[in-house]
């Protein structure tokens, strides 16, 4: 068990470009979450997958954002036509959902800077 | 909607106790969490408390829950420099998906 991994760790892009982030959850964790954290704030929920099904999306997830988890394992988060306001840390978390305390294990995050 | 509030900054002397406070609005959560975030590291679950408990002690950590006032606190005894981090109170909002609602975080600075 190597924990939740995210790639890349840092991404600098110009406004208007598309970016894609990847999250590899802990193996056999069927639940996967994406959060966004801006400077000085706590993480905010973006979206949730149970296996390959995307079951909830936050209103923060505009049409420019899309997330997938095609085989119920890794997940990708794509941002199209990036804006400066998209600059943030994007966090992925996973959990098995079969324990009383449903601990979410977080990855190290991908820090996005939009110039 | 659900909301979680925390004070933003706390400075303590090494060896003293630290108390980090949190208030929440959602009352249906089965439990509440404290997460810790260190520079360059991911969020880690520090401790939790079930909503039917008033207090939980775990080594140097004591969690107090006042359900009437919707107030949660984390006390760290004998605070060390290694405790310097950002501490987040988190409320799983329920609905079957347990998405976490985080406070803004309290930055704990421990000085000699």
Image (cartoon, grey):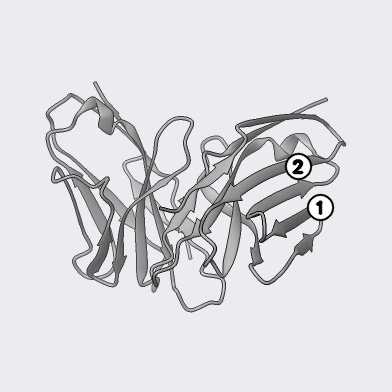
Image mark 2: chain: B
Q: Secondary structure at mark 2?
A: strand
- Mark pair 2, 1: CA separation: 12 Å
Q: What label does residue B60 carry, if any?
A: 1
- Residue A60 location (% of width, % of height): 27, 45
Tell me if mark 2 has few (under 14), some (14-19) or many (20+) residues whose alpha carbon lies within 10 angstroms of its own. some
Left or right of B81: which side holds B95? Answer: left
Left or right of A58: which side holds B96? Answer: right
Residue visible at 45% across and 53% down? B2
Sequence order check, earlier mark of 2 and 1:
2
Closer to the eye: label 2 or 1: 2
Q: Secondary structure at mark 1?
A: loop
Q: Which residue is mark 2?
A: B19
- Residue B93 location (% of width, % of height): 45, 61
Image mark 1: chain: B
Q: Nearer the viewer, residue B59 or B27?
A: B27
Residue visible at 43% across and 65% down? B98
Residue visible at 54% across and 53% down? B90
């Amino acid at each position: 068990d190597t924990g939740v991994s995210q790639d890349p760790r840092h991404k600098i892009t110009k406004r208007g470009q598309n970016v894609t982030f990847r999250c590899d959850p802990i193996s056999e964790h069927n639940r996967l979450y994406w959060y966004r954290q801006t400077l000085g704030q706590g993480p905010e929920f973006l979206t949730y997958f149970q296996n390959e099904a995307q079951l909830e999306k936050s209103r923060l997830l505009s049409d420019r954002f899309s997330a997938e988890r095609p085989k119920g394992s890794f997940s990708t988060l794509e941002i199209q036509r990036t804006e400066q306001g998209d600059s943030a840390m994007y966090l992925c978390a996973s959990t098995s959902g079969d324990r009383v305390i449903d601990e979410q294990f977080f990855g190290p995050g991908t820090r996005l800077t939009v110039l | 909607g659900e909301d979680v509030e925390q004070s933003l900054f706390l400075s303590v002397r090494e060896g003293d106790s630290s108390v980090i406070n949190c208030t929440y609005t959602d009352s249906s959560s089965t439990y509440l969490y404290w997460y810790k975030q260190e520079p360059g590291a991911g969020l880690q679950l520090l401790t939790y408390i079930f909503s039917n408990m008033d207090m939980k002690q775990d080594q140097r950590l004591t969690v107090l829950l006042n359900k009437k006032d919707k107030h949660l606190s984390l006390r760290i005894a004998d605070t060390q420099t290694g405790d310097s981090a950002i501490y987040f109170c988190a409320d799983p909002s329920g609905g079957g998906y347990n998405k976490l609602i985080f406070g803004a975080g309290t930055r704990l600075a421990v000085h000699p």
